[in-house]
Amino acid sequence: MPRPADSPPIYDAPSERAGPWWRVHRVEDTLLSLVLAAMVLLPVLEITLRSTLSVGVANAAALVQHGVLLVGMLGAAVAAREGRLLSIAGLGRWVPERFRWVHRAAAGGLAMAVTGVLARAAWDFVSVEREGGNLLAYGVPVWWVEAVMPAGFALIALRLWIRSGERFADRALSLAVAAGLLGVAPLSTATPVVALLALAVLLGAPVFVVLGGVALWLFAGDDLPLAAIPLNHYQLTVNPSLPAIPLFTLAGYFLAEGGAPARLIRVFRALFGRFRGGAALVTVLLTAFFTSFTGASGVTILALGGLLMPLLQGVRYPERAGIGLITSGCSLGVLIPPALPLILYAIIARQPIETMLLAAVVPAAVMTTMLVLLGIWRQPKDTAPTPFDAAEALAALKAAKWELAIPLVTFGGLASGLVTPTETAALTALYAFIVEVLIYRDLSLTRDVPRVMAECGLLVGGIILILGMALGFTNYLIDAQIADQVSEWVQASIASPWVFLLALNGLLLLVGAFMDIYSAIIVVTPLIVPIGLAFGIHPVHLGVIFLANMELGFLTPPVGMNLFFASYRFGKPIGEVARAVLPALAVLAIGVLLITYVPAFSMWLPGVLLR
């Protein structure tokens, strides 16, 4: 079962923070924060110089893109340090306590073996790049930045080993498992490797280990250089559009960690509290809004759950229905611009980011409206409305005016055509920083900002690590022409586009339930886009269908990711949370079918605004 990246480790492994290494960890967190800060300031400086002096920073775009590589590896190393690499918890939860040390050692050994091979492959890649002598900017060789990959993988492997057991004997067993795997089961040996990777899934190895292990096995089986996998990871991180992901995420973290949630709740409550269902409307809109910026619905559940549940209970909303509304509302942000999955899909499907963002507006409105109507219907009918207070409404709007202007900053930048999506994301992050730190002073510059930035980098690093490994696996499928074979088989088996779309929805629902959304985009998009084109389905419309199904996957029992976050946040069993989201799951499924079979929902707005 998927385990939230923000939840505590499955087992109580020793935390490195408790030892003498805390100064090293503080340096790591500081470096991570500084790289993120540079990624924000460089595009802003570029915009300023370009508009005032008609000059720019030398190779600024490439510097920001390589910042993504640094954030990715540093953040992943911090995530490994904290035991928060995204994993699949599987059988680990049910292993009896007296045998759990064996489970830890086996999972740690498997993870170490794969990560160690990745470190060696990354070193081979950097060695080749060093001989090339390419320069990044201001005389800095590119390989200096690329060297973070072998160092990062080696550090992740070390921390996986440290967290593999509490005693030296447990860690020794884990090391023996890793050494034995590398010596007994070479990567080119099909059956043992596949069996071991399947075991890794069940034991709770991180997702990137499974994806990376599969990619290593496939490349080794065809005698292809393993250095191609870190090469794919590098090519992904320096994609010109990818920096928008960590920058929008940083903006979302500043807002979520500051006072924005409370101020926005006050605004919506003042404006809509007099209507029956006003609390449900506030809940759905706020959860969707914050997820669209943070890129992680689980973060929104953890950040806003404690604020929104008292609001719902204040209007006598049933507890189970409230949990279901918050949990399902957080999934809606996947389709609300500038949602990070929209940007990533546009990159992988090679579609304009602006087109993809506009295409999602109407479908997002449809899904949000349906969930709001469900929330209103489930609220007690005899709830006394809150009388409208014009003075309170004006005061709430005045207090939150700076946060209410954030969509103007984001969409104004995208619509103006004067700045790139990356520069727009940087402006949004800087604006959120100014609002929460300098204007409202909800976050301390010295105490809170480094913590928030490190937390953001941790999340981004874990995601980018998964994306890089998934891309290696995907590129193998493309080179092996597996995508073409799948397309031919589907066209031979299914004649009607309507039937294909129905089958696609079923497949994507399963994918969304069992895979995290980012690796699903990387792996599945290159397979389904050619098939969709063969049936006359535009890649942009297909992307909206894809992401709408991912929203359902977050909620699908028994393994939907949001179920675990909600269980952790509200202290309820997984089964109870699953029952709570079933009505929302049914309603949103109807919305997915509407989006699927009415292409105008997706294609109308881009057609009007991008002519």
Image (tube, rainbow, N blue to C red):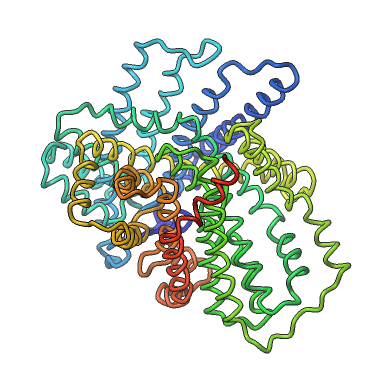
Q: Position of residue 99 (x, y in %)?
A: 25, 62
In percent of the image, x 27 and y 54: which residue is there?
201
The residue positioned farthest toward the bottom in the image shown: 382
Would residue 24 appear left or right of 465 to someone viewing this image?
right
* Residue 14 visible in the shown view: no
Residue 301 vertical position relative to residue 104 in the rendered view, above or below? below
> Visible in this render: residue 48?
yes
Residue at 75% across, 20% down: 52
Looking at the rendering, in which quadrant would you find the N terminus?
Answer: bottom left
* Nearer-the-camera pick, 185 or 464: 464
- x, y (%) of residue 261? 68, 59
In the depicted structure, whether residue 510 falls above or below residue 238: below
Question: 58 and 485: which one is in front?
Answer: 485
- Is 458 on the left-hand or right-hand side of 506? right
The residue drawn where x is 50% and y is 28% is 65
Please give the count of numbered marks on the rendered protein. 0
Write down the quadrant of residue 178 in the picture.
top left
Indicate the position of residue 416 as horizontal and vertical percent values.
67, 36
Q: Residue furthest right?
A: 391
Quadrant for residue 267, please give it.
bottom right
Task: Pinpoint residue 129: horizontal percent, then vertical percent.
Answer: 36, 17
427 and 90: which is toward the camera? 427
